[in-house]
Image (cartoon, rainbow, N blue to C red):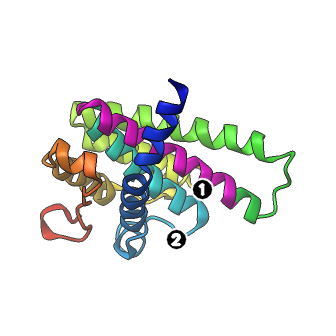
Amino acid sequence: MIFGLFGKKNGNRRIVEKQYATLTTAARHPYLYEALDVPDTVMGRFEMLSAMLILYFRRTRTGGTSGQEIAQEIVDAFFEDVDHSIRELGVGDVGVPKRMKKFAGMFYGRLESYAAALDSGNRAGLAAALRRNIYPEAGEGAPAMGGLADYLFAAEAAMAAVSDDDIKTGVLTVLEPGRDEHAA
């Protein structure tokens, strides 16, 4: 029975890689950094990839089991990427678990706060959460993040329109930022 689980997970590998690449590409879109006030830094990219994964995770929670399994595998791939990045930045083996625990806490904290704002349709609340997370030390001098909040609401609405079959096959696309309907 355990071997069946491993086989199923390996069967999703191509789908997971394809969908993770799509989400990563969306999170690295230059418009986010040039026009929506996201800093083009390691942490800025972490924030955007986290936001994309959160939207994807939320989309798959209402779908079938297969979509949820793929979403979990994508989150697992994300944390493998974070682990690899931490090591590339020179953190030794002893420090990696502590940093990974911190990043996991950050991700799931964002999942909770962004979900609350998205569920209630609270754009100002999402903008405030983004501002707090993306600019934790800037205080009142931080950008308002309203444009980014608008984009994330629009991206989530676009993901909601994607069929469960498209989720299961890994062909979900992410709304390109910078379109007039969600620009700040």
Residue 151 occupies quadrant: bottom left
- Magenta range is 62-85
180 above or below 71? below
**Would residue 38 appear left or right of 176 to someone viewing this image?**
right
Q: Give neighbour class at mark 2: few <14, some 14-19, many 20+ (Cα, 10 Å).
A: some
Give, as a three-letter code, the residue at label 1.
Answer: Asp
Q: Which residue is mark 2?
A: 40
In the image, 61 versus 182, the foreground residue is: 61
The C terminus sits in image quarter: bottom left
Q: Residue at x 68, y 37 (%)?
A: 101
The x and y percentages for residue 100 are 69, 43
Front residue of this view, candidates 85 and 77: 77
Q: Report the side of 132 relative to 91 (left or right).
A: left
Instruction: Give the x, y percent position of residue 120.
Output: 23, 30
Q: Position of residue 46 (x, y in %)?
A: 53, 56
Q: Position of 91 compared to 58: left or right? A: right
Which disc, if any, is residue 81?
1
- Magenta stretch containing residue 73, yes or no? yes
Q: Who comes first in sequence, dot 2 or dot 1?
A: 2
Please say if 38 is above or below 60: below
Please name the residue shown 53% across and 32% down the image: 3
Q: Which mark is residue 26?
A: none
